[in-house]
Every structure is written in C-alpha cells, then in structure tokens.
Image (cartoon, helix red, strand yellow):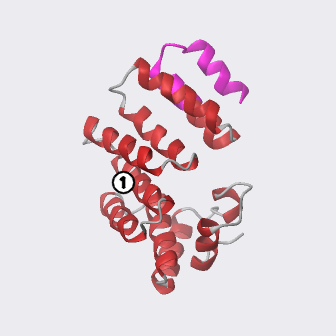
Amino acid sequence: ARLAREAVRLGKDDAFSLCWAGHSLAMVVGKLEEGAALINRALASNPNHALSWGLSGWTRIWLNQPEIAIEHFARAMRLSPLDLSFHQYEAGIAFAHIRAQRYEEALLWAEKAIRDQPNAPDAAMAVAVGCALVGDLEKAKRAMKRVLEIAPGRRVSTVVGPERHGRFSDALRKAGMPE
C-alpha cells in the first residue's frame, strides 16, 4: 500500500503509474474502491491507455460490476488489438461472464484466450470454473490440472481472498484446486 501510494505521489499525472497503483491497491491490498478511483484517474488522464482499461476491467469484476468490466476489456481490446496481453482481456471477459452467471458465454471467451495464449493460467482457470459451474466436472478437472501445471502455487486461499465461500470458490474446489 505504501509503495502504491508513493507511485501515485510521484506519478500523479501519469496514467501508467496511476493504473498500476490502483490495481495494486485493489487486487493486492484489497482496497477496491480506492484502487478503482485511481484507475479512473488514469483513464481520465489518458483515455487511450489500453492497460488502464484492462486493469479497470479486473477491478470491476471484483466490485461485482460485470457489465462495466466487459465494456472496459472490450475497449482495451479495440485500443490495442495486437497487445501481448490480449488473452488477459479475453480471460477477463470470461470471468466477468462467470460473475454474471453466464457460464456458456464465459467458456467461449476462456477458450479464445487459451487459443491466443495456451500457457495462460487465468484462461485455464476460467475454463475450470465455467465447466464446474455447468456441471462438466471431468473437463473442469482437466483444466484445473493445466492451471496447476502452469502455476503450481495457485490455491483457493490465494485466488479468492478472505471470502472463500460461494459459487466461485466452490467451483475451484470441485475442479480440484488445493486449499
């Protein structure tokens, strides 16, 4: 938190600094509202900064604003169609659809992300969660096996934070993610 706030102090007019500081506060420190506000400042500072739109999308998922998240990921994709992180935006759209309980749509986006980057753990995790939520536990377990090959340290406790109960964390467990 201290370093993120220092980045804001030093880069108060820099979209890159603001969006990363906001993302860090939201996703690492758990200060979702404060992080979202900084990302909004980054977007106001440079509305053409694709990374800010993408990081805003992830933050919006955690704020339970899946429709806004989808819009922000889509904007990032339009701004930077050749971005090396394009698969992350597709995976983000998958997770936004999971949040909105549109699991089949989530699977379509997760599979696009995997096609774009076969070693993307977030995309594989979206497949695992989506499949678990539609009841295809065999495919969910295969996808989770892939997640753990790519990112062996992933755990339910580190992915979902303190709120370890609910549809998402239950899906992770059904797919075979360790606690």
Total residue callouts: 1
49 versus 127 height, above or below: above
In the depicted view, which residue is nearer to us: 63 or 18?
A: 63
In the depicted view, which residue is nearer to us: 177 or 130?
A: 130
46 versus 131 height, above or below: above
Q: Is residue 77 left or right of residue 38?
A: left
Q: Report which residue position mark 1 lands on.
A: 90
Q: Position of residue 126 (x, y in %)?
A: 47, 65
Location of the C terminus by quadrant is bottom right
Q: Position of residue 161 (x, y in %)?
A: 70, 54
Stretch of the chain drawn in magenta: 1-21
Residue kind at label 1, given as amino acid type: Glu
Magenta: main secondary structure equals: helix
Q: Residue at x 57, y 77 (%)?
A: 175
User: Can residue 99 be found in the magenta stretch?
Assistant: no
Q: Secondary structure at mark 1?
A: helix
Location of the N terminus by quadrant is top right
Q: Position of residue 145 (x, y in %)?
A: 53, 75
In the depicted view, which residue is nearer to us: 148 or 164?
A: 164
Q: Residue at x 53, y 73 (%)?
A: 144
Q: Position of residue 118 (x, y in %)?
A: 37, 63
Q: Residues within 10 Å of mark 1 (few under 14, many from 20)?
A: many
Q: Quadrant of residue 52?
A: top left
Q: Residue furthest bottom?
A: 138
30 versus 134 height, above or below: above
User: Can residue 8 be found in the magenta stretch?
Assistant: yes
Q: Is residue 63 left or right of residue 117?
A: right
Q: Residue at x 74, y 55 (%)?
A: 162
